[in-house]
Image (tube, helix red, strand yellow):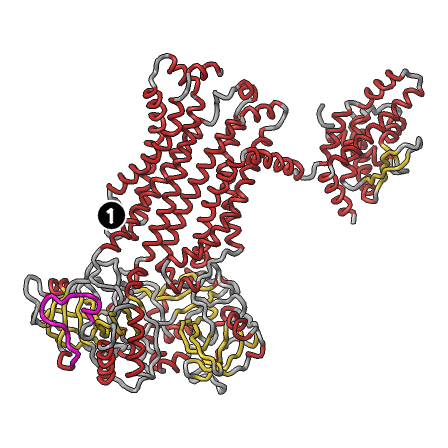
């Protein structure tokens, strides 16, 4: 079980940041949302979400807080910080550049 | 404040791991439970729902581990883990740790103590602006003699250089003095300096109070308010409680009115290391003390001269400029007669670096200190080699542990780091203890160096630079002795390690065999150096100096301010000496120009009268002379073998005494008694030669002259006459029943005959004798101590190696004994192996010792650096130590019970 490659890791970060942009969410909800939105295309193993979440928290892009979930049980909710918002913009821009470039090659090729 | 949040989070995760891990588990469990609940809603069975949830989640343990990894904070956590583990390892074998720490404390402490002195005397930069620009200007004469270099300049030189040289941003002279300081009713001696007016400006110093001296203060007669003076910060604090009102205070310095104008900055101790002046006066003050002619005399060389290089000018350029300027400067400075002597053409001006100031002590102590530094360096290496051996032994005992940890996935780098952390954990307390040791030992070494000036003025307290060097020492040690086991541990393959049992071993043997000969070699070099220095001291102590030193005291007379001069002064000395001889408890008393063995010399050019005029003596300066009163020789125990003593009478002014060496030198093969010697005198002003003759009225026994380190030279004893130089500062010598009685007698006689002259402290001849070999004594004691340390450490190393070998070969030995080998053969087997190691070490050591002995040859007296007996003796001693150390564990080999040994496998 190797570490996710840089591309995948970077993408996962982007997905997470984008997902929590709207509201504070706990890990399970984030995983669900990514799966739903991507139309089941992105088969991320749910567990690999957690190292990424903790790393983003460590970097100060997410802030975490224990709170009651919809079932009333305590869960850890993640919120986007101001720095995280900036990071999201940057990563989104990177992603757009990259995917545009790939599109260009794939379509013209 | 975001970084603060992040920091607290990391610290939290670092130190509250258990709690944080619990939270992580709760978070993951929540996820799984949510998924299970969802799966149940989709209609799965309980068991199926759980399995599906796990499938989509992945292995929770791995997730947990990977998440954990994201917490790692710059390896600090792993480091703490290593430290905790290392502490446990150390606690498991506290005896080992104590030995290691003690060995290190000795090694590091010795280095720290010696380095503290080296630093204080040689390395510490002056606390002035841009010290690296400072240079010292000194003359070098063409003689092949230590005294021909580092000759100070004088005021005319300093002024001529200052006005001509383009390389310097200021040139200043510095001279130290002992003054009598009088503030109101309080009167005491004070150590001071006279300095050029621009000195503080050139050094770039700021006053702590008031102002510093400037060029305007350095005028003949001083200012209208008396001489301006700056006092040291120390004196300001100690005597005036750092009161700024001290500025403007009127005091008296050696009978001259002086105004304190300011306080030197804190920490500034002058440019002459170890002098520590407490008062600075302008250079012109010298004229007030010694007369205006003295200050401007071209032939008197007394002023240490410094200069600051202009930015962008280096020392070599300055040196080149001085070479060009020197002839012109000599034209101005030297009187014409001297300028035209051939010697004057060969004078050179040296521009030496002075960022660390300058000290006469350096001439005497640089080499001994560097020697000590080398010795302690060798001791530290032995310590490291020894600890390396101990560590290897432990590492081989822990091989299985390493193998298991490797098998469980610990990377090799981690194992190596673990071992290095362990050695560091031993090195750090070792270093701390070592610093403590040095704190105690440093002042003691300084005391033992035998120079009272050095003792009082060199601070031997460690400072930041020294602590930094010590820390570096400790780090180096840790790496040095931790490296070998780490290297062997990391080289071992996991399977090999696991298959190992206690009795067989792979790595390490080669490395261990290297350390013991290394220690033996260094120890041999130490023992050889120690024996050479030791026998030097024995020679110096037991040789016949020609003197009897017990209960002999010298007192320097301070008759400068008495009205009597010339013949009257001579008569006065004779009266005091005669009175002293009548005192109770005094056996003999007399006067002399020079007390022996104090390093002072007086020269004169003599030849046998009637000999062909050009029979130049070997000595360029002539022969050693001393001017003495009647009974001086009997007071110091030199016998008169033929003829008679000098008489305290003008009628004897044309007589002299010769010692045996002198008689043999001037009148080889003839009787010297009754013959005449002719002295050539050079008038210092006109350089005209004049001659006087004296008749040899007695032949004395031989004795040393200025130092115990030279052989018995030819000595000519002349009577004290009105022409004697420095007539106001002759020495009284008293041989009495005790040193106490001498002082009482001196005080009484002086009070009766010359009550106006101050009393002075005596030099005790016995003490002088001891002090004059203190340097050798210290070197021999310390090197002896280091040699013993080296021997003991080597013995420990050998013991360890043999014990380890016997342990390794238990089965083999058991087998041999089962097959009929006798105990003697087994013993021989083990001892032969160690003897081989010893021989290798000694061969290498003999070469190292050869170099070391060559290096210390200038410290030796009465023993040659290549003395084979010293080498053989040292090798024999080391061999005995080694074999005894080996025999103890080798006996254990003999005790091996074959049955037990074989069954153990």
Q: Give the percent coordinates (x, y) of residue B778.
A: 35, 54
How crowded pointer 1 is (Cα within 10 Å; few <14, some 14-19, many 20+) is rated as some
Residue A54: give x, y in percent of width and height: 78, 35
Q: Position of residue B417 (x, y in %)?
A: 58, 34
Q: Is residue B390 left or right of residue B781?
A: right
Residue at figure coordinates x 34%, y 22% from the top left: B829
Which region of the structure is painted magenta?
B632-649
Judging from the image, what secondary structure is the residue with disc 1 in?
A: loop
List x then y, in percent, for residue B456. Answer: 43, 64
Image quadrant where residue B41 sits: top right
- Residue B885 in the image: above or below residue B678: above
Q: Nearer the viewer, residue B648 or B741?
A: B741
Instruction: Write down the quadrant of residue B841 in the picture.
Output: top left
Q: Which residue is mark 1?
A: B864
Residue B637 is a magenta residue: yes
Vertical arrangement, residue B100 with respect to residue B609, above or below:
above
Residue at x-position 39% and y-position 43% = B789
């Amino acid at each position: 079980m190797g570490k996710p490659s840089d591309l995948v890791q970077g993408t996962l970060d982007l997905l997470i940041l984008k997902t929590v942009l709207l509201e504070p969410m706990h890990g399970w909800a984030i995983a669900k949302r990514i799966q739903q939105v991507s139309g089941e295309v992105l088969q991320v193993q749910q567990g690999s979400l957690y190292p990424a979440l903790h790393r983003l928290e460590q970097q100060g892009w997410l802030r975490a807080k224990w709170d009651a979930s919809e079932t009333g049980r305590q869960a850890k909710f993640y919120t986007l910080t101001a720095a995280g918002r900036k990071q999201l913009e940057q990563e989104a821009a990177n992603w757009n550049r990259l995917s545009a470039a790939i599109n260009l090659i794939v379509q013209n090729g | 404040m975001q970084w603060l949040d992040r920091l607290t989070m990391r610290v939290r995760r670092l130190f509250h791991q258990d709690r944080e891990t619990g939270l992580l588990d709760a978070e993951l469990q929540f996820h799984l439970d949510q998924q299970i609940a969802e799966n149940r809603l989709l209609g799965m069975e309980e068991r199926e729902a759980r399995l599906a949830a796990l499938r989509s989640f992945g292995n929770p343990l791995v997730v947990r581990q990977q998440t954990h990894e994201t917490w790692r904070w710059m390896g600090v956590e792993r480091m703490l883990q290593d430290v905790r583990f290392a502490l446990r390892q150390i606690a498991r074998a506290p005896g080992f740790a104590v030995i290691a720490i003690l060995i290190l404390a000795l090694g590091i402490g010795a280095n720290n103590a010696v380095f503290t002195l080296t630093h204080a005397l040689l390395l510490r930069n002056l606390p002035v602006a841009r010290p690296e620009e400072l240079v010292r200007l000194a003359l070098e004469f063409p003689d092949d003699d230590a005294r021909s270099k580092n000759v100070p300049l004088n005021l005319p030189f300093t002024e001529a250089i200052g006005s001509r040289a383009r390389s310097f941003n200021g040139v200043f002279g510095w001279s130290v003095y002992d003054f009598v300081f009088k503030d109101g009713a309080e009167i005491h001696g004070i150590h001071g300096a006279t300095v050029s007016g621009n000195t503080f400006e050139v050094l770039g110093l700021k006053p702590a109070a008031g102002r510093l001296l400037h060029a305007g203060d350095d005028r003949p007669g001083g200012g209208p308010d008396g001489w301006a003076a700056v006092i040291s910060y120390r004196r300001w604090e100690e005597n005036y409680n750092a009161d700024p009102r001290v500025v403007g205070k009127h005091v008296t310095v050696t009978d001259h009115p002086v105004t304190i104008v300011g306080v030197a900055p804190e920490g500034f101790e002058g440019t002459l290391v170890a002098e520590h002046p407490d008062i600075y006066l302008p250079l012109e003050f010298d004229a007030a003390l010694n007369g205006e002619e003295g200050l401007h005399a071209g032939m008197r060389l007394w002023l240490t001269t410094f200069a600051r290089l202009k930015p962008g000018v280096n020392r070599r350029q300055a040196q080149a400029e001085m070479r060009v300027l020197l002839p012109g400067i000599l034209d101005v400075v030297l009187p014409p007669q001297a300028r035209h002597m051939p010697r004057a053409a060969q004078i050179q001006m040296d521009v030496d670096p002075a960022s660390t100031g300058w000290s006469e002590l350096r001439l005497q102590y640089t080499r001994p200190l560097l020697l000590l530094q080398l010795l302690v360096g060798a001791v530290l290496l032995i310590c490291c080699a020894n600890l390396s051996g101990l560590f290897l032994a432990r590492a081989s005992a822990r091989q299985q542990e390493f193998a298991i940890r490797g098998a469980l996935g610990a990377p090799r780098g981690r194992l190596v780091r673990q071992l290095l952390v362990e050695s560091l954990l031993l090195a750090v307390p070792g270093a701390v203890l070592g610093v403590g040791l040095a704190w105690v030992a440093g002042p003691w070494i300084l005391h033992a160096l035998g120079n009272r000036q050095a003792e009082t003025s060199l601070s031997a307290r460690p400072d930041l630079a020294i602590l930094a060097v010590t820390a570096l020492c400790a780090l180096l040690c840790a790496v040095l002795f931790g490296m070998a086991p780490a290297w062997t541990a990391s080289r071992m393959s996991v399977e090999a390690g696991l298959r190992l049992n206690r009795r067989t071993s792979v790595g390490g043997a080669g490395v261990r065999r290297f350390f013991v000969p290394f220690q033996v070699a260094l120890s041999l070099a130490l023992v050889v150096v120690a024996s050479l220095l030791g026998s030097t001291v024995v020679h110096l102590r037991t040789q016949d100096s020609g003197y009897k030193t017990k209960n002999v005291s010298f007192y320097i007379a301070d008759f400068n301010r008495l009205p009597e001069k010339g013949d009257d002064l001579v008569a006065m000395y004779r009266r005091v000496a005669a009175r002293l001889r009548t005192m109770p408890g005094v056996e003999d008393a007399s006067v002399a120009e020079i007390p022996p063995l104090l390093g002072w010399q007086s020269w004169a050019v003599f030849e046998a009268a009637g000999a062909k005029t050009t029979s130049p003596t070997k000595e360029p300066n002539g022969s050693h002379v001393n001017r003495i009163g009647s009974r001086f020789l009997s007071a110091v125990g030199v016998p008169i073998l033929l003829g008679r003593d000098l008489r305290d009478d003008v009628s004897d002014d044309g007589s002299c005494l010769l010692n045996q060496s002198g008689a043999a030198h001037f009148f080889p093969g003839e009787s010297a008694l009754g013959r005449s010697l002719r002295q050539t005198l050079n008038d210092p002003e006109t350089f005209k030669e004049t001659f006087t003759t004296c008749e040899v009225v007695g032949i004395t026994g031989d004795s040393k002259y200025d130092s115990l380190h030279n052989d018995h030279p030819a000595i000519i004893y002349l009577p004290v006459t009105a022409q004697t130089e420095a007539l106001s500062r002759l020495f009284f010598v008293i041989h009495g029943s005790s040193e106490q009685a001498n002082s009482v007698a001196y005080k009484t006689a002086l009070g009766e005959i010359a009550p106006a002259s101050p009393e002075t402290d005596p030099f005790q001849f016995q003490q002088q004798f001891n002090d004059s070999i203190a340097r050798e004594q210290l070197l021999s004691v310390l090197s002896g101590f280091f040699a013993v340390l080296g021997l003991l450490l080597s013995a420990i190393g050998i013991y360890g190696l043999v014990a380890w070998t016997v342990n390794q070969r238990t089965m083999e030995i058991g087998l041999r004994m089962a097959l009929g080998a006798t105990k003697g053969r087994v013993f021989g087997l083990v001892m032969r192996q160690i003897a081989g190691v010893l021989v290798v070490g000694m061969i290498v050591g003999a070469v190292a010792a050869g170099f070391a002995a060559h290096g210390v040859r200038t410290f030796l007296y009465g023993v040659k650096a290549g003395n084979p007996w010293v080498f053989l003796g040292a090798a024999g001693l080391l061999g005995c130590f080694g074999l005894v150390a080996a025999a103890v564990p080798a006996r254990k080999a003999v005790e091996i019970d074959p049955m037990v040994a074989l069954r153990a496998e």
